Amino acid sequence: MTTGHVILDTDHERLVGLIDQLSASIIEGKSKIACAELLDGIIQHAKVHFAFEEQLMVEQCYPKADQHAIEHARLIRQAVRYMVKFNANCPESHIPLIHFPEDWLTFHILTADKELAEFLSAPF
């Protein structure tokens, strides 16, 4: 699940690690507090990572910067909604937490981020 851009891939690896920890914690029945802290860590890391990506896009005049930033905002809103439901003890709220990485990782990294990395590495 690499894009070919070292900094982006390193950040993605850290994000994947946090998401894997969250999934394992939910499956293992760890405390709600531990799971909520992991989810918050994912959201905070994603915000920092997304800000970095958006800075790169502006600096490099990436033509799809606005579209990519909109996708970032959507992903953060989605994660925050999951956190609100989880914290409110909504029935079955842990299930989406196990599956939301599919959208974050599979879709976003392998499509939008890979395209960004290709743009960044293209010769001028």
Image (cartoon, rainbow, N blue to C red):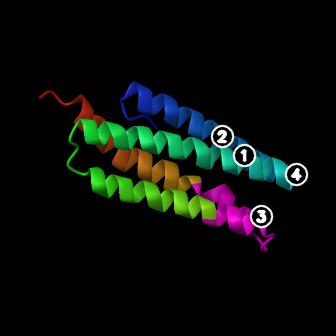
At label 3, which amino acid type do we have? Asn
**Most common SS among magenta residues:** helix
The numbered mark at residue 31 is: 4
- Local SS, label 3: helix
Q: Earlier in the sequence, mark 3 or mark 1?
A: 1
Residue at figure coordinates x 44%, y 43% from the top left: 51
Distance between the Cα atoms at labels 3 and 4? 12 Å
- Vertically, is 123 above or below 75? above
Residue density around tag 3, few if under 14, some if 14–19, many if 20 or more, within 10 Å: some
Give the extent of the magenta segment.
Answer: 81-100
| Residue linked to disc 2 | 18
Of the residues under marks 4 and 2, which one precedes in the sequence? 2
Residue 7 is left or right of residue 92, and the answer is left
| Distance from the alpha carbon under mark 4 to that under mark 1 | 11 Å
Which of the pair 37/20 is nearer the observer?
37
Mark closer to the chain start, 4 or 1: 4
Please report whichever mark, 3 or 4, sits nearer to the chain's N-terminal start.
Answer: 4
Residue shown at the point (76%, 53%) measured from the top left: 36
**Which numbered disc flags the more N-terminal residue, 1 or 2?**
2
Q: Residues within 10 Å of mark 1 (few under 14, many from 20)?
A: some
Q: Are marks 3 and 2 in contact (CB under 8 Å)?
A: no
Identify the secondary structure beneath mark 4. loop
CA–CA distance between discs 1 and 2? 7 Å
